[in-house]
């Protein structure tokens, strides 16, 4: 399969006078065309930082970004802001949590869509834009009349659907959802996820789904990348990783979520907290919280290993690479 995005040793640090926060550390993985990849990890694990780096939304004076993020032959981390402005929305778009807050309360949805559309296609006619948006509104299960409504006339779920539709205006190759459905009730969230999965079948779309909710990944992604304290612990197919998580952190994350089948069981939180991200880590960054950690784990960083089912795991327990059946 053709790769759409390949990350190689991506590091993102926030720097100010007093200290440096190593928020994303040496992350490498790739996304194939048509993939849907969930990025999971507890709060503060660097998920949004990574997404913002890919879109170059950080204040460049206060961040240090190294590594490569290759997209259509370009390194997203190195291109100029002008080049990025060309790509943003046209090729890569993003939907944030509460994206609806970005809409102006005093203009109808249609007027705002026209403004957004004209940034990239200044010559587009009103009719052309309306037709395009109405087609997208249908995809996210909204009626045509939404085009003429003001944001305050809609519910949170409707507005988030509008935000998703807007992100698809220019048929982007890659869409990044950053907790885009988190603020919604579970029923609405479930419906939107179904619509997104359906939409992908109809459009040539690749998606990154950032969430701390494993059930969102289970419902809408075919691959998953597990981040902890800015480092990649495990990445591979959802069907393999959910059935047989290999990294102790992935095991902990899955154990701390209610069963996806709805069975009653005791949930186990992962004891301890994220480490201080202003310090570089020597051994495995998860070692202080890992029930299996030994001296080597605390001393040396495990290398990412590729298993038979193509997943990659960074853990000393799996350095042979062959334990996986
Ligand atoms: N502008 C900033 N300046 C300094 N540190 C920051 C900044 N933004 C984020 N951080 C730190 O970087 C780390 C990663 O944060 P990030 O927002 O990427 O996590 P996240 O995985 O998206 O968490 P959440 O699930 O809560 O959204 C955290 O330790 C956070 O405190
Ligand atoms: Mg975040």
Image (cartoon, rainbow, N blue to C red):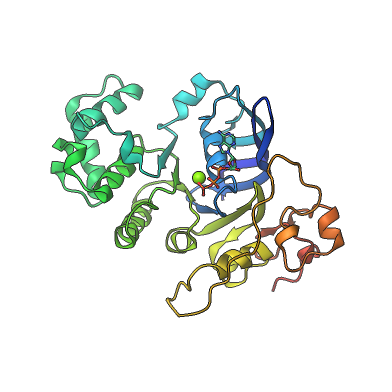
Q: Residue at x 20, y 32 (%)?
A: 110
Give whichever of 302, 128 is nearer the camera. Answer: 302
Inspect this view and state whether residue 316 appears. yes
Q: Is residue 284 left or right of residue 156?
A: right
State the residue lying farthest toward the bottom. 264
Q: Does residue 267 appear left or right of residue 317 in this picture?
A: left
Residue 166 screen position, x and y as percent: 31, 38
Residue sitting nearer the eye, 81 or 185: 185
Quadrant for residue 9, please give it.
Answer: top right
Q: Position of residue 275 (x, y in %)?
A: 69, 50
Residue 122: x %, y % from top left: 30, 19
Residue 205 locus on image (x, y percent): 42, 46
Residue occupying the point 23% across, 45% down: 137
x 57%, y 31%: residue:
76
Q: Is residue 168 visible to us here?
A: no
Task: Examine the rendered structure and indicate whether residue 188 appears above or below residue 120.
Answer: below
């Amino acid at each position: 399969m053709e790769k759409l995005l390949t990350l190689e040793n991506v590091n993102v640090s926030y720097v100010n006078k007093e200290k440096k926060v190593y928020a994303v550390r040496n992350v490498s993985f790739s996304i194939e065309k048509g993939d849907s990849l969930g990025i999971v990890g507890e709060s503060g694990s660097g998920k949004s930082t990574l997404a913002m780096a890919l879109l170059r939304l950080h204040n460049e004076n206060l961040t240090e970004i190294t590594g490569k993020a290759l997209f259509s032959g370009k390194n997203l981390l190195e291109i100029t802001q002008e080049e990025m402005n060309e790509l943003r929305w046209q090729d890569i778009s993003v939907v944030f949590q509460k994206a609806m807050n970005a809409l102006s309360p005093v203009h109808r949805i249609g007027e705002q869509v026209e403004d957004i559309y004209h940034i990239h296609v200044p010559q587009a006619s009103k009719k052309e834009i309306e037709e395009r948006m109405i087609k997208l509104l249908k995809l996210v299960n909204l009626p045509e009349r939404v085009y003429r409504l003001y944001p305050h006339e809609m519910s949170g779920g409707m507005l988030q659907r509008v935000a998703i539709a807007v992100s698809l205006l220019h048929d982007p190759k890659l869409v990044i959802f950053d907790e885009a459905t988190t603020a919604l009730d579970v029923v609405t969230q479930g419906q939107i996820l179904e619509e997104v999965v359906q939409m992908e079948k109809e459009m040539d779309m690749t998606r990154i789904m950032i969430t701390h909710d494993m059930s969102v990944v289970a419902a809408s992604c075919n691959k998953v990348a597990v981040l902890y304290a800015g480092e990649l612990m495990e990445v591979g197919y959802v069907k393999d990783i959910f059935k047989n998580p290999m990294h102790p952190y992935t095991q902990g994350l899955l154990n701390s979520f209610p069963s996806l089948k709805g069975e009653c069981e005791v949930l186990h939180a992962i004891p301890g907290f994220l480490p201080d991200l202003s310090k570089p880590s020597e051994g495995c960054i998860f070692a202080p919280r890992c029930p299996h950690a030994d001296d080597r784990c605390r001393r040396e960083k495990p290398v990412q290993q590729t298993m038979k089912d193509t997943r990659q795991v960074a853990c000393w327990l799996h350095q042979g690479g062959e334990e996986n059946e």
